[in-house]
Image (cartoon, helix red, strand yellow):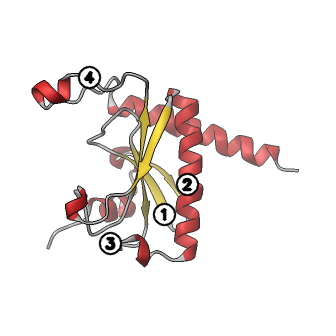
Amino acid sequence: MKTCIFCDALSSEDDEARFVLWRGNVCFVILNVYPYNAGHVMVVPNRHVPSIEDLTDAESAEIMSATRLMLRGLTKAIHPHGFNFGANIGRVSGAGIDDHIHFHIVPRWNGDTNFMPVLSETKVISEELCATYHKLKLAIQELKKENTTASP
């Protein structure tokens, strides 16, 4: 039986080893270990479902809240100039994992594309994965603390 990397990460108790950045009630955020750019994260529902149409209203709402948190965390931690956000639904769309829907947040910088992918099929990532993980984890913790202390 084929295992799901998202379900495996969700059931693991070692978030750092699995690069899980945040856990909510019905979704979680994980760092992509094959990133397009430094800070490439994925927002994943806890339930193993293949498409957006299968999500509950609660799952959809928390996924968007988690996305907002990640955009703020990424901005605080690594200062991108913009983001790509979306999902590949179905294998023909480029989904490497097409049976568990997930949403990509890819930080972008002016000039972050270059000749390396064209000439050598190689993507250059400017920072080691563990370093990015720790920066993002700290930024998320700080944002959560700011939100609890800012409440009346």
Label 3 and label 1: CA atoms lie apart by 14 Å
Label 3 and label 4: CA atoms lie apart by 33 Å
- Provide the secondary structure element on which disc 3 rests: loop
In the picture provided, is 118 more to the left or to the right than 26? left
Name the residue rendered at 43%, 27% in the picture. Answer: 109
Name the residue rendered at 32%, 27% in the picture. Answer: 128
Label 2 and label 4: CA atoms lie apart by 30 Å
Quarter of the N terminus within the rendering: bottom left
Residue 62: x percent and y percent?
A: 57, 63
Q: What mark, if any, has residue 114 been given in the picture?
A: 4
- Provide the secondary structure element on which disc 2 rests: helix
Marks 2 & 4, CB-CB < 8 Å contact: no
Label 2 and label 3: CA atoms lie apart by 19 Å
Q: Nearer the viewer, mark 1 or mark 4?
A: 4
Task: Judge the density around disc 4: few (<14), some (14-19), many (≥20) Cα neighbours within 10 Å.
Answer: few
Disc 3 marks a residue whose amino acid type is: Pro
Residue 148: x percent and y percent?
A: 75, 48
Q: Nearer the viewer, mark 2 or mark 3?
A: 3
Marks 1 & 2, CB-CB < 8 Å contact: yes
Q: Which residue is mark 3?
A: 50
Marks 2 & 3, CB-CB < 8 Å contact: no
Counting residues from the N terminus, which is met first, the one under dot 2 or under dot 3?
Answer: 3
Counting residues from the N terminus, which is met first, the one under dot 3 or under dot 1?
Answer: 1
In the picture provided, is 41 more to the left or to the right than 34? right
Q: What mark, if any, has residue 27 been given in the picture?
A: 1
Q: What mark, if any, has residue 66 been given in the picture?
A: 2
Counting residues from the N terminus, which is met first, the one under dot 2 or under dot 4?
Answer: 2
| Front-most of residues 14 and 63 | 63
Disc 1 marks a residue whose amino acid type is: Cys
In the picture provided, is 63 more to the left or to the right than 13? right
Disc 2 marks a residue whose amino acid type is: Ala
Label 1 and label 2: CA atoms lie apart by 8 Å
